[in-house]
Image (spheres, rainbow, N blue to C red):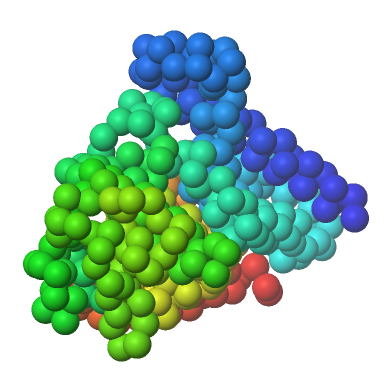
Amino acid sequence: MLIDRYIGRAQLHAFVVVFVSLAGLYFVFDAFTNMEEFITHAAETGGLLKLLGSYYGGRIVWFFDVTSPIISLASAMFALSWLERHNELTALLAAGVSRWRIARPVIVFAAGVSILAAASRELVLPAVREAFARNAQDLDGKALQSFQSRYDHRTDILFRGRGVRSATASIDSPSLLMPPQLGEFGPQITASRAIWKPAADGRPAGYLLKQVHEPVGIDSLPAMELGGRPVVFTKSTAEWLKSGDCFVVSDVTFEQMIGSANWGQYSSAVELMRAISNPSLGVASDIPLRVHARFTAPLLDMGLLLLGVPLVLGPSRRGVFAAVGSCVGMTVVFFLVVMGSHALALGDAISPSLGAWLPLLVLGPLAAWAAEPMWR
């Protein structure tokens, strides 16, 4: 227990120092780069410090998710190198303490960090992703952003528009190209704005189109259905609509409609699996890849650690600087394998499931072989 506390305390100290240093360096550089935008919006949010706190509060969770495997390995290398530098490692081995016993607190600490990162990925990041969805140039979400046309695959309606505004979850100057089965009133529906509305009070989810220009006389037109399900509501069939408005049913949320990278990357696994089963969305291979990657991430984190620890703790121990250099090279190769496998899956060269599990199939046995001398 004394060894566990000693090594664990050294690793925790190193983890905190490295994390705070890297996060501080990134945030300070980013803050000074975008200080003009922050000062411009400070009066609207109650002061500069409050704005910086809200802006970087969510980003620190993101930073932990991105860097925790690397920092966990770095802190483990520091704790074990500290023992080596002060000849404490030699004394422990001479006293009959096995390498596995010395490495155990390091592995337990890394496993705890990996579990914490996985929990953050599933519970915290999905809840705060909107906090870091906007960059410094669009802090209030009112700026007009570009919008690429997107299909609702259940209704075959093509959503087009001049641009989007994230603050109001709206599309400016929407132009919805209607499929032949829904083109009885014309080839398209155009309006001044389309606002995303989640399902509520018995009304399905979809987009409220304000001030419809085309087709003319939208209020007098009947609702349109597809396969017995309503697709377009008009005032003649929905009293809750205002004159000149209509409502287009869609299960493609605003985040999904605009192709937000934050939605795909920082949604929970449950949300991603719901998206896969959503017939309106028509997800690409990146979403199934992310679902499988959620299950492999903790195992890959531990694999990275087991590849690095033997460089310091193995029978053929090297100097501290040589071990650190070897660890950096090993880490680069590790992430090249992971990113290469994911790239093959995104390029449809292999299936998304294989793309997520292939790094583990390659690096897992390698990590077990590298760590094998420590079990002796």
Question: Is 350 on the left-hand or right-hand side of 205?
Answer: left
Query: For the C terminus, which image quadrant?
Result: bottom right
Of 106 and 269, the residue lying toward us: 269
- Percent of width and height locating residue 217: 19, 57
- Residue 140 in view (yes/no): yes
The quarter of the image holding the N terminus is: bottom right
**Above or below, 249 relative to 279:** above
Name which residue lies at 9% across and 67% down: 187
Q: Quadrant of residue 346?
A: bottom left
In percent of width and height, residue 367 lies at 51, 70
**Image label count:** 0
Residue sticking out furthest to the bottom: 227
Percent across and percent down for residue 70 are 51, 48
Q: Residue at x 42, y 72 (%)?
A: 275
From where the camera sits, is residue 335 visible? no
Picture quadrant of residue 214: bottom left
Q: Is residue 335 shown left or right of residue 155?
A: right
Position of residue 172 measured from the top left corner of the image (x, y, whole percent):
24, 43
Q: Which of these two is toward me, 34 or 301?
A: 34
Residue sitting at x 54%, y 69%: 202
Q: Residue at x 49, y 44 (%)?
A: 130
Q: Is residue 232 left or right of residue 362?
A: left
